[in-house]
Each structure stands twice: as C-alpha cells, then as structure tokens.
Amino acid sequence: MNVILLGPPGSGKGTQARRLAAALGLVQLSTGDMLRARVAAGDEIGRQAKAIMDRGQLVPDDIIIRMIALRMAEFDCRNGVVLDGFPRTVAQARALDRMFEERGLRLDRVVVIEVDEAALVERIAGRFSCATCGAGYHESFNRPRTDGVCDACGGTRFIRRDDDRRETVRARLGAYRNETAPIIPYYQDKGLLRRIDGMAPIEGVARQIAAAIGPAPAEAARPAGRVG
Ligand code: AP5
C-alpha cells in the first residue's frame, strides 16, 4: 500500500502518517523531517534548505526529488510508504509517478486532510515535539500523558520548530495555496483522491483515513471555507 497524505501546514499530516505507518507496517517518508535532519547535520542540502524553510517557501524541486528518489530506492520502501509533505508541486507529483513506475509499484490513494485556516494557525502555534524521538504533541489537543515526559521514548527535552513563527506560517499557507493545491486536480483526474474532515479529533481523523484507504468510498463534498 502506497499512500500520500496531503494538506496544508498543521493539518495533521505528520501526526496521522506516524500512526498509519505503525498500524500498517509502512515506511513514513516526510520530506520536512528529512530536510530538518539535513539542517541539523549541516550538510550541503541542509545549508541550502535552511534559509528557504525559515522563509516558509518551498525548497527547489530538483533537491527534493533527488532526496526522495534516493530514499525510495531503499529496500524497506518496497513494502509500502506513507508520504507526508511530498509531493508539493506538480513537477514533484510527476517525478513520483516515474519512481513508482520504474520500480513496478503503484500509488493506491491520496488523502487530502481539510482544516479551517484559523485552526491551522492555532495548531502550529501550540505544537512541540520530543527532541529525542520526534514524537509530536500539542499544548491543548495532544499533551504527553505525563507532563514533561515523552509517551513514546520517555525523553524529557522538547523542541519547537524555527518555521512555526506566525509570519512564516502565513508564507507556508501561501505556498500551499499557490504551489501545492494545484496537485489536487492532478490526483482527482487519476481517481485516487479522497477528502477527509481534518477538523475532527485526532482519533476521528485516523478513522476517516482508514476508511478512505480501504474500499473506495465516493469523494465527499468540501464544506465552504475549508483549506485543502
Ligand atoms: P513540513 O515539515 O512538511 O511542514 P508542513 O507541511 O508545513 O506541515 P507541518 O509539519 O507543519 O504540519 P502537519 O500537517 O504535519 O501537522 P502536524 O501533524 O504536525 O515542511 C516544512 C518545510 O520544509 C516547508 O515549509 C518547505 O520549506 C520544506 N519542504 C518540505 N517538504 C517539501 C517539498 N516536498 N517540497 C519543497 N519544500 C519542502 O500537526 C500540527 C499540530 O496539530 C500538532 O501539534 C498536532 O499534535 C496537532 N494536531 C494534529 N491533528 C490534530 C487534530 N485532528 N486536532 C487537533 N490537533 C491536532
């Protein structure tokens, strides 16, 4: 099973991708996490990407496509992947088609997580993650079971992302509208797209995703004012 989770910043792609990967034994491929690892390592890609990410813009397609193609070629990805944050442009979507084709694999489903814009900003502003294992939390909606202790690994140090400042979040939403949303019709035309209500609590969103990647339900109508 190969699945793309698509949605604006803060819609819950990372939260749901981690759950889905664990539930179905898939590899989670997050280009955002990969880039942040490169930034932390201080390598060439990390140095190029840092300033772009801090401005809330998209890293150039050639860098991203090369990075994901190398990872997709690794053996574990043959068992299935959940892509979180990739593709983000039509050029990336086309490159992904070629990667699947070359390996004799196919994309099964693209799930768009739709969330009201005001909620996105609140979710991003309250987000933090474990510095040790990367597990994601939220000050109001998703706190660790014991304050100050990571549920997943017991770590006690937490971090916030540099690009979660309010001005940068606005730029990231703009990049989503202008460059990423146009890939929705690309997948709609292929009959792979399902839209889900990302305003539900985390468990409810997970149930909708499970239903969307199972036997194909009809595509739901999008409520007015939703971003996705
Ligand atoms: P990336 O890391 O992909 O960031 P993003 O797309 O902006 O998405 P986020 O990670 O902010 O949000 P999310 O949807 O994963 O939400 P989360 O689960 O954390 O990319 C960062 C940057 O890297 C980009 O700006 C770009 O520069 C670059 N980049 C990455 N990929 C690229 C590509 N392919 N091409 C070019 N450039 C690329 O949830 C958010 C918060 O809400 C959490 O606190 C969570 O606990 C909470 N939450 C989640 N679900 C719910 C819910 N249902 N109800 C209440 N709270 C919830």
Image (cartoon, rainbow, N blue to C red):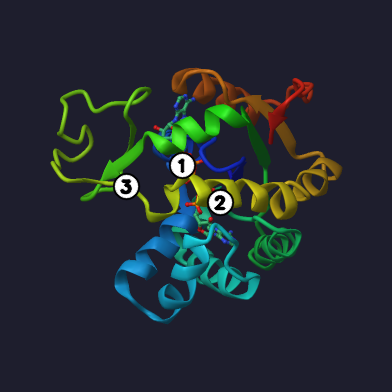
- Mark 2 within 8 Å of ligand 1, using the beta carbon: yes
Above or below: residue 121 compared with residue 157: above
Task: State the residue position of label 3.
Answer: 160
Check the image and report above or below for 26 versus 146. Answer: below
- Which residue appears at 48% of the width and 54% of the height? 29
**Is 90 displayed left or right of 155 in the figure?**
right
In the image, residue 200 sits, relative to residue 170, either above or below, namely above
The amino acid type, in three-letter code, at marker 3 is: Arg
Give the numbered dot on residue 14. 1
Q: Is the CB–ligand 1 distance for label 1 below 8 Å?
A: yes
Alpha carbons under labels 3 and 2: distance apart: 18 Å
**What residue is disc 2 on?**
85
Q: Is residue 204 visible?
A: yes
Contact? badges 2 and 1 (CB < 8 Å): yes
Where residue 35 sits, quadrant-wise, is: bottom left
Left or right: where does residue 72 sit relative to residue 156? right
Residue 47 pos. (x, y %)? 42, 77
